[in-house]
């Protein structure tokens, strides 16, 4: 089992719709969870982080964490074509390492 | 946010030569820097964790004699790919944690990445 799993996609949504990206992790002791966006050929950039169970909202983005289910998700409201990118879920483990999922490629169709 | 500068952004070299990539934290001190490698359409794979003043910790399967990491100061870590081969061609990305972030929380700040092509 991979430490951090994501559906590779592509996930296609129409402009203005809600995009839902999911991530599961295997280490129950994980404490910090991050969503990064990566455009082709570029480095990842942080979108959101979440530490506690529940929802965390920042503008059009909402991160959801359920530690019991070892599940973290990212919702993007009012999706724009500029949101088209690969979204990487990252988990910070007790060994102080940050482990990344394989990423989900999102396509927002104009 | 904090800035991490990585240099060079692109490098092409001949097989058998060595290439050095620098990673600098410009406006903060980083006790820990991470080196990742990313092949096309794949995720970031952690290669090693670099701690200032001590030896790097390499992930399983990463050859420490081939990928030399030096973290001589709180703002600079270098990765040297020795005797490079075409299969080493990849996108190498460094990231850093601020000295003020203790433990395993806190944002990772990424460099711009270095695309290595070995002919």
Image (cartoon, coloured by chain):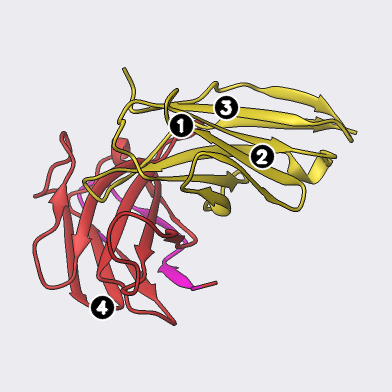
Q: Residues within 10 Å of mark 2 (few under 14, many from 20)?
A: some
Sequence order check: which comes first, mark 1 or mark 4? Answer: 1
Mark pair 3, 4: CA separation = 36 Å
Q: Which residue is mark 1?
A: B42
Which chain, by letter, is red?
A: B
Frontmost of labels 3 and 4 is: 3
Query: What is the number of the mark on residue A85?
Result: 2
Frontmost of labels 1 and 3 is: 3
For residue B79, what is the image quadrant?
Answer: bottom left
Secondary structure state at the residue bearing disc 3: strand
Q: Are marks 2 and 1 in contact (CB under 8 Å)?
A: no
Q: Colour of chain A?
A: yellow
Q: Residue farthest to the top?
A: A1
State the quadrant of the N terminus of chain A: top left
- B45 vs B70, left or right, is right
Q: Answer yes or no: are tags 3 and 4 on the same subunit.
A: no
- Residue B59 visible in the snapshot: yes
Q: Which residue is mark 3?
A: A22
Task: Please check the rendered image and state whether residue B7 is part of the magenta-colored stretch, yes or no.
Answer: yes
Secondary structure state at the residue bearing disc 1: loop
Where does residue B93 sit, x and y in percent of width and height?
Answer: 40, 54
Nearer to the camera, A96 or B35: A96
For residue B97, what is the image quadrant?
Answer: bottom left
Q: Which residues are magenta?
A: B2-20
State the quadrant of the C terminus of chain A: top right
Frontmost of labels 1 and 4 is: 4
Chain letter belonging to callout 1: B
Mark pair 1, 3: CA separation = 17 Å
In the image, what residue occupies the spot 11% across and 48% down?
A: B64
Where does residue A27 sit, x and y in percent of width and height?
Answer: 30, 31
Q: Which residue is mark 4?
A: B74
């Amino acid at each position: 089992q991979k430490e951090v799993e994501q559906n590779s996609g592509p996930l296609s949504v129409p402009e203005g719709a809600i995009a839902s990206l999911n991530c599961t992790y295997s280490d129950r002791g994980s404490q910090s969870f991050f969503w990064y966006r990566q455009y082709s050929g570029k480095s990842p950039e942080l979108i959101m982080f979440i530490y506690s169970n529940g929802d965390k909202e920042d503008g059009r983005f909402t991160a959801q964490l359920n530690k019991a289910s070892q599940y973290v998700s990212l919702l993007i409201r009012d999706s724009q074509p500029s949101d088209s990118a690969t979204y990487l879920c990252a988990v910070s483990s007790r060994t102080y390492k940050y482990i990344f999922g394989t990423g989900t490629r999102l396509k927002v169709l104009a | 946010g904090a800035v991490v500068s990585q240099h060079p952004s692109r490098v092409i070299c001949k097989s058998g030569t060595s290439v050095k990539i620098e990673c600098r934290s410009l406006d903060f001190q980083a006790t820990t820097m991470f080196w990742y490698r990313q092949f096309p359409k794949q995720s970031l794979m952690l290669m090693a964790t670099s701690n200032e003043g001590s030896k790097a910790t390499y992930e399983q399967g990463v050859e420490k004699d081939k990928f030399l990491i030096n973290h001589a100061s709180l703002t600079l870590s270098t990765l040297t790919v020795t005797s490079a081969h075409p299969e080493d061609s990849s996108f190498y990305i460094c990231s850093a944690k601020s000295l003020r972030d203790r433990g395993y929380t806190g944002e990772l700040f990424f460099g711009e990445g270095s695309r290595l092509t070995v002919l």
